[in-house]
Amino acid sequence: MSQSESIDLYNDESERFLLEHDLILESAGEGIYGIDAQGRGRFVNKSAKDLLGWDVDDFRKTNSHDAHHHTKADGSPYPKEECPIYAALRDGKVHRCDNEVFWSKDGKAVPVEYTSTPIIKGDEIIGAVVVFRDITERKQTAQRLEKAFEDIQKLHIALKKERDYLREEVEHTVKFGDIIGESPALKQMLVQIEAVASTPANVLIYGESGTGKELTARAIHNRSDRSKSPLIKVNCASIPKELFESEFFGHVRGSFTGAHRDRVGRFELAHGGTLFLDEIGEIPLDLQSKLLRVLQESEFERIGDEKTRKADARIIAATNRDLQSEVEKGNFREDLFYRLSVFPIEVPPLRNRREDIVPLALHFMNKQCANMGKCDYKLTREQGRLLENYSWPGNIRELEHVIARAAILSKGKKLLLDPNLFSSEESIVHDETHSSKKLKKSKFLTADEFKQKEKQNIIAALAESNWRVAGKDGAAELLGLKPTTLAHQMKKLNIRKPAL
């Protein structure tokens, strides 16, 4: 081979090497560019052009730092002397950075991580190679993870507050669910619950509206050997007379007009558990015999069905009426009364549980705070005295509604009670800006006086609601009573709408 042929072969190999080198640079996924010792651009690969828009000619016109690395992500100037890319030209070391931005030709900040590696020839640093990649997606993912972590932290705090709240509730309701209080009258009732709960005896719960008869029934059921089976509730006052049998005993399809499918009655649902018959005194006299038969024989038939079914259900009944008096008047069957009242329990009205009023108010206040997501309100000592000196004709239900309204209307941490509630004879409105005012001592009332006062209170609510008993803003809602209960009290107190 001649010398000229060897030179041609060498040139061909050199060109091929340079071509392959260029192909490798152009094929790389990362952005790559090279600078000389003065920071001027010498080559830029395709990925770098795509990511930043700069070409090698742009870098030659000015140094690379002034072109794309002149400003930090927060907008502050980035001096060339602090630039890690240029540091490689000074100290001959590899410099890495993972949290900066390069600026594209159109002025957009691109989050990048990069490595600046010096090019050394002999003992001289003749330039540097910069390899970088766009980390926008990674930054966005990190931000999403950070946001998710913040949300988890907030949820953790919320759950901790809820846990603490539930822990306080458990401490308040150690043995008897939501029955709260330490008054002698309540303790006497709890002793009765403890005594009868584990027996199969039927229980008749007496008490005024709003005293918590259903909670009492639930406490008995939960402490009985039937606690793992259902407690089925029936509001006897709300069942139309024509649907009484269907509601209690069920029916088969086609047994009467409108019976489009089989229906399971409440007695069957309560099999193995407890059936709570609320407002038992409202059952019409001619339907009481059907109920008595089931209680006596523990058997029933669905309407339209000849099959006899068993009903193993413990009965707990409740009423706000004097059933013994109703028996004497002929309005309630005597045999049914004795069947139900094997073990009578009387739930004391709130006015006989003065020691429990503040603990109950705090319980309802915490409950409202949890439900509404508001801050914990504070009940002042003076407000506690106001609550204790009020007669609470609507009992615990009225107290709960008063606290709920106050929580809705209150701002900040102080609970603002409605002063109009305490403008009766039992108490005076307390002006909290003049703490020297003294509350009047409670004055006892005779039965007739109390009945007259109750009548006046109901008439005032009826007048406020334009004599509308039920529905939104009706008198029943204002008083915190069920419409059926209010209707019964109106009848008992002979309250009628005045003629126009």
Image (cartoon, helix red, strand yellow):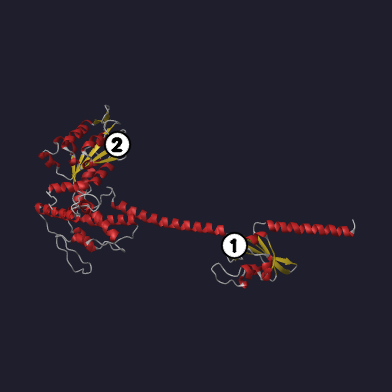
* Residue at 28% in and 53% down: 172
The Cα–Cα distance between marks 2 and 1, rounded to whole angstroms, is 67 Å
Q: Quadrant of residue 237?
A: top left
Amino acid type at circle 2 is Leu
| Residue 57 higher or lower than 177, as above or below | below
From the viewer's side, name the closer residue of 496 and 320: 496
Q: Residues within 10 Å of mark 1 (few under 14, many from 20)?
A: some
Residue found farthest to the top: 306
Place residue 1 in its image quadrant.
Answer: bottom right
Residue farthest toward the right in the current orientation of the protein: 2
What residue is at 49 percent from the left and 58 percent from the top?
A: 146
In the picture of the structure, the residue carrying the numbered disc 2 is 269
Q: Position of residue 73 (x, y in %)?
A: 55, 67
Q: Secondary structure at mark 1?
A: strand
Whether 204 is drawn above or below 46: the answer is above
Residue 31's x, y, as percent? 65, 60
Q: Is residue 145 left or right of residue 102?
A: left
* Crowd tier of the residue under label 2, counting other residues whose Cα lies within 10 Å: few below 14, some 14–19, many 20 or above: many
**149 sits to left or right of 84:** left
Residue 401, numbered label: none
Q: Please report the residue visible at 19 percent of the width from the left and 56 percent of the height from the top.
A: 464
Kind of residue at badge 1: Val
| Residue behind mark 1 | 112
Q: Position of residue 292 (x, y in %)?
A: 19, 34
> Mark 2 or 1 closer to N-term?
1
Dot 2 falls on a residue whose secondary structure is helix
Q: Residue at left 14%, top 47%?
A: 491
